[in-house]
Image (cartoon, rainbow, N blue to C red):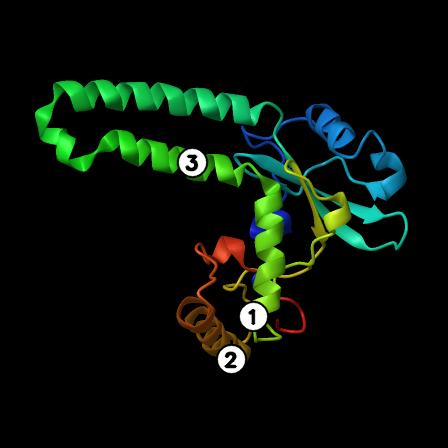
Amino acid sequence: HGAHQQSQRPPGGKACRGRPHQHQFHRADPVLQAELDGDYQTIFATFDTEPVACGSIGQVYRATLADTGASVAVKVQRPNIKKAIRADIEIIGWIVRQLNEKVEEVRPYDLPEVVASAGKGILEELNFSIEANNAHLFNLVNPYDIVFAPKIFTQFTTGRLTVSEWVEGVPPGDPSINAEDGKKLATLGCQSVFDQIFISGFFHADPHGGNILITQDRR
């Protein structure tokens, strides 16, 4: 299915416990407090403080909503990550400007523009509202019921926080998927990718096995 893996279970259901880039919940707690006006304990009936997935810009936790009991994935941006990334972009930008001025051979590649463009894209990834809007738009234009992005709970989603439905599933290469189901899923997946690129023009740009789950009902 079209779910972003970072918003769901990691491949094989493995938690990120012990990974170097995992941080403790006390660092995520202030972000939750700030983005939900200090009210997240009333929004969630349960909240597992052990992350189920870790990424370079955020960590994902499993929770249940207090009002409906629905299981959700809560992606929380790493604290102060934007400041650190801006500093890195500025340093790299300074280096390539010096290189561009002093090494004539690299000037045709316009490295300062390359860095500026890449930096803009990275900073956009830090705005979780864009990802949430993209998931919603994907479901609107997608004609295939078996391909979907997780539902976003927009009332709890901000630039640094995403709350989406929890999706149980396995990676595409999981041995529990038999050959017949695998063939059907691969065929329909290819049709969906074709539709995304050539029909709607709105497509998932990173559809590798780590960003896709297959649900029990083979969606």
Residue 49 picture quarter: top right
Crowd tier of the residue under label 1, counting other residues whose Cα lies within 10 Å: few below 14, some 14–19, many 20 or above: many
Q: Which tag is nearer the camera, tag 2 or tag 1?
A: 1
The residue closer to the viewer here, 106 or 209, is 106
Give the x, y percent position of residue 85: 47, 26
Q: Tell me the residue that label 3 is attached to.
A: 120
Q: Which residue lies at the image location 40% right of the left edge and 33% below the top edge?
A: 119
Question: Where, by quadrant of the figure, is residue 90 drawn?
Answer: top left
Position of residue 4 in the picture relative to residue 157 (left or right): left
Q: Which of the numbered marks, if any, corresponds to residue 184?
A: 2
Placement of 21 over or under 148, stated as above or below = above
Is 70 situated left or right of 112 in this image? right
Give the residue type that dot 3 points to: Lys
Crowd tier of the residue under label 3, counting other residues whose Cα lies within 10 Å: few below 14, some 14–19, many 20 or above: few
Give the CA distance from mark 2 to mark 1: 18 Å
- What amino acid does circle 2 point to? Lys
**Under tag 2, what secondary structure?**
helix
